[in-house]
Amino acid sequence: MSTEPLRCAGALIVDDDGRLFIQRRSPQRVLFPDTWDIVGGHLEPGEGVEDALRREVTEETGWTVSHILGPVGEYRWTGADGLDRIESDFLVRIDGDLGSPRLEVGKHTEFRWLAERDVALLDEHRDVNDGLIRRIAEDAFAALRSIGL
């Protein structure tokens, strides 16, 4: 078994109002059950980060990435399964009906568009010492400001 961290890619999907797309993970999920999260997941063998990013967006929402606006950051974390991960997150724009994502049945239960003033919502049902998804969203809003969006 490899001791290398698993690689993950995350998409911070941005709408025209500068809000971020988030979706609630189903209560049955092993990692972060019943919490708000961004779109993303693990890289498949031989897959690059950008390819994984595009695949995950389509799998989780039915949308297609139209533009990768830029990086948000790289985050190291360990899941409740004990596995270490390195996650590379990016700001993206998508093609598709922003009001009608096709959420993955059994994996996500609802979605919303998050304004910067509402980032505390991301702490809901999370361990108070976690803070990962909120930190990623705060970094994404900072990145949006830095590129003038």
Image: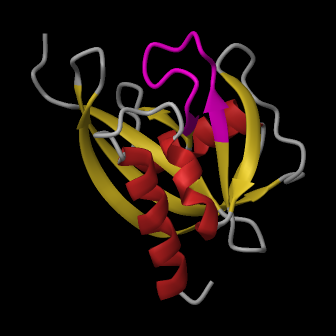
Q: Which residues are magenta?
A: 23-36
Q: Is residue 71 left or right of residue 110?
A: left
The structure residue drawn at horizontal position 73% and vertical position 55%, both measured from the top left corner, is 113
The structure residue drawn at horizontal position 30% and vertical position 55%, both measured from the top left corner, is 74
Tell me the quarter of the picture where residue 127 sits: top left
Q: Is residue 46 above or below residue 117?
A: above
* Image quadrant where one finds the C terminus: bottom right
Q: Residue 46: x and y, percent?
A: 35, 31
Q: Residue 1: x and y, percent?
A: 13, 9
Q: Residue 111: x and y, percent?
A: 75, 40
The residue positioned farthest toward the left in the image shown: 3
Q: Is residue 148 above or below residue 131?
A: below
Q: Is residue 85 above or below residue 1?
A: below
Depth check: give the residue in front, 45 or 25: 25
The secondary structure making up most of the magenta span is loop
Q: Residue 3: x and y, percent?
A: 9, 22
Whether residue 25 appears in magenta in the rendering, the answer is yes
Tell me the quarter of the picture where residue 27 sits: top right
Count of residue discs: 0
**What kind of colouring is applied to the model shown?**
secondary structure
The structure residue drawn at horizontal position 69% and vertical position 13%, both measured from the top left corner, is 106
The residue positioned farthest toward the bottom in the image shown: 148
Whether residue 70 appears in magenta in the rendering, the answer is no
